[in-house]
Image (cartoon, helix red, strand yellow):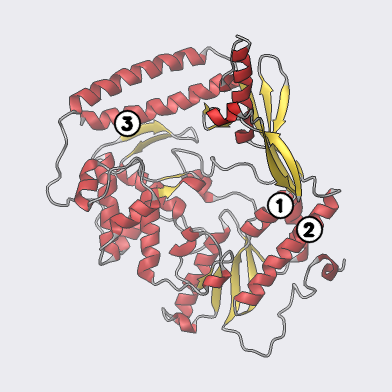
Amino acid sequence: MKFENRGFSANTDSVEENTKPKRFKMCYVDSDTFVVRCSKLIQEDYIEVRHIKSGRSMEFRNRTSFGVRGNSIIDLTEDDISNNVREKQIEVNGKKVKIPYKWLAWKNHDQEMKNAPTFCIDDFEVLSKARLSSEFENLEDAFKTAEMVFSSNIKGVKDNMESEDYTLCMSSGNGNYRDYESKTVRYKSSRGEKPIYFQEFKDRITETYKNKIWWTDNEEAEDHIQYIAKQQEALYGEDRSKWTACATFCDKDVSQVYIDHKNFDKWDEGWISHDKFYCEKTLVSQTISGDPTDTIEGLPTLTESTTKYFGLRKANGVSKATAEKLLEGSKTIQEMWERAIFCYQQYYGFDKNYQFKDVHGEDQNWTWLDYMQQCYVLVKMRNYFGEIPCLRKYLSSIGVDYTKEIKYGETEVDTESLVENLEVCKTTMSIIKELTKSYKSLAKPKLVERMEEVSKVVDELEGNLSMLEK
């Protein structure tokens, strides 16, 4: 196989000669992103919408084309109706095509004109699907194009990373310890399916770059970058001008790793060399906010006493930006962790226990520290092979006493509407439990799924009730 004819460099397994000395000996690449993007490139996504009662199906480019956003039907505007806008023109593979525009809203509009019953979202089953992009005549041509794009990504690494050689850190697909460590919700459960040709493309890349790949084992590619940083520090100390390794990735969450790196999506931004305090702040803020992209649950929200003390605006949830703002002004890493502990203790209560059955079917009895540990173990990059990051051990090692309640000034408790809110919660829980009972008798998959969702709300509501009662 002549890779040069397919956009590949003939020297994928050897160091290219260059008279100019390189800054580093090895660059470690988080290459999972390359594989996913390239295999995604050759497919086209669409949805299949099936009318449950009749069984008739239609294809749409996406949910917006079908005419829904979230759990609501997208309304027609006055201009839509007056101009009878039922299609929208877009460009696909260089060709202009027309696709349906707010189809469901127009369907209901026509039904109303005929005095006929209208439809709701629950009348339909929406399935996400994918197939080979119509841009390609066959799968082999598609793979050739994807391989050339992958090769161009590798060329970008060679041209920009000032390194004599490179290593592709790549997930083996043989599990991830985070899958088990996530107890309240399944790790990465909110992500969609991998591209339909992901494994086939990965196999082809593996054959070409087999001597360049460093496979993971029960972990993620980013963990390998943390290993390298720890090894480099052990060998050469904290002065990174002496280090022989660098890294490239695009995930900002990996910024917790203390290593010189570049963002392969933004080569023009140049070298990024965060100090240890910045890296630690990244980790602490992630431990507070979690990561919705990977379905990592951080704090559900900040209590009123927390927002008041730190001068933050009251908001639903805790974004990474909010978590970073909460840490502003911290003078030491210990102070940052104490602030994070304070937030967890304020939300869950210092000595409160929560019993529940986790997603693996095991019984749990958690305190605030267990919730914080779950987030920490999921966002933290491993320091060495086989490690399960433990917050208790780490806090002890840096001199933070997690066994004591952290207090900042006098914490005020808002009791003005406490009794009223408690009654509302109790009433709501009763209603939800009645709904749950009714769902259990239904066999339809969608309704069974709803029952499971309502059960989760019940568990959360019971937790909130216990906090209010306290």
Mark 1 residue type = Leu
Lower sequence index among marks 1 and 2: 1
SS category of the residue bearing label 3: helix
State the residue in front, 202 or 352.
202
Disc 1 target residue = 41
* Inter-mark Cα distance, 1 to 2: 9 Å
Query: Which mark is on residue 145?
Result: 2
Q: How many labels does the image show?
A: 3
Disc 3 target residue = 463
Vertical arrangement, residue 264 with respect to residue 175, above or below: below
Vertical arrangement, residue 110 with respect to residue 16, above or below: above
SS category of the residue bearing label 1: helix
Other-residue count near label 2 (Cα within 10 Å), few / some / many at <14 / 14–19 / ≥20: some
Asked if the residues shown at circle 1 and circle 2 are in contact, with their CB atoms under 8 angstroms apart, the answer is yes
Mark 2 residue type = Thr
Residue at the left extreme, as displayed = 410
**Residue 291, position as x, y percentages in the image:** 45, 49
